Image: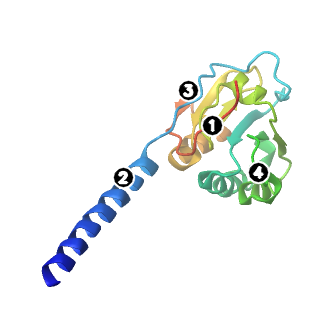
Amino acid sequence: MGRGWTTAVIVWSAAAGGGTAWLWRAAAQAGEQSVARGWPAGSALNLDPSRITLVVFAHPACQHAQSTMKELAEVLAGRQDRAVVHVIFAPGEKLEQSDAWQLAQKLEGADVRVDPDGSEIHRFGARTSGQILAFDPRGTLLFRGGITAGRDRLVARLAGVASDLAQAPVFGCALTTDR
């Protein structure tokens, strides 16, 4: 029984270690970026005529969305006058009970809504939960990416410091729509 037990433990440990490594690698891979190049025609969202407009996409079941909302609150603290924020959620079960939804509701002045048919998600070309897009008052894309890797670039955009398109990888779950 000693050798059989030892072999079973070794095999189980190798399988568990391999599975864990696979999960870590999958979690560390960046998601697909939005394909937006500028403010899309036909959007139901309002582009602010004097400030930066941030559009944040989230899926209620994605754990990364909760982190995005927490970090966004930190970035916006003391800078609410520099940006208008739209948080667009993909539909999902128990949406309003999700931590991400609750945190988004606490973002001062944010327009938080569900995109029931995925039309805004599709219009902006969003692919990954946690995707943030920043537009100037003319609709020019200023920033595209996630807040974890792009925090400094986003803060620079809000301060009016950066001049070229700032990009950062976005880490999150896939936004799924029926389109």
Q: Which residue is mark 1?
A: 157
The image position of residue 85, as x and y in percent, is 78, 41
Q: Is residue 20 left or right of residue 44?
A: left
Tell me where residue 111 sits by quadrant: top right
Tell me where residue 113 sits by quadrant: top right
- Residue 21's disc is none
On screen, residue 74 above or below 114: below
Secondary structure category for the residue under label 4: loop
**Depth check, front residue: 22 or 10:** 10
Q: CA distance from mark 2 to mark 3?
A: 33 Å
Q: Amino acid at mark 3?
A: Leu
- Residue 165's disc is 3
Colour treatment of the image: rainbow
At a point 62% along the width and 42% down the height, the residue shown is: 129
The image position of residue 130, as x and y in percent, is 62, 44
Among all residues in the image, which is located at the extreme bottom?
2
Q: Quadrant of the N terminus?
A: bottom left
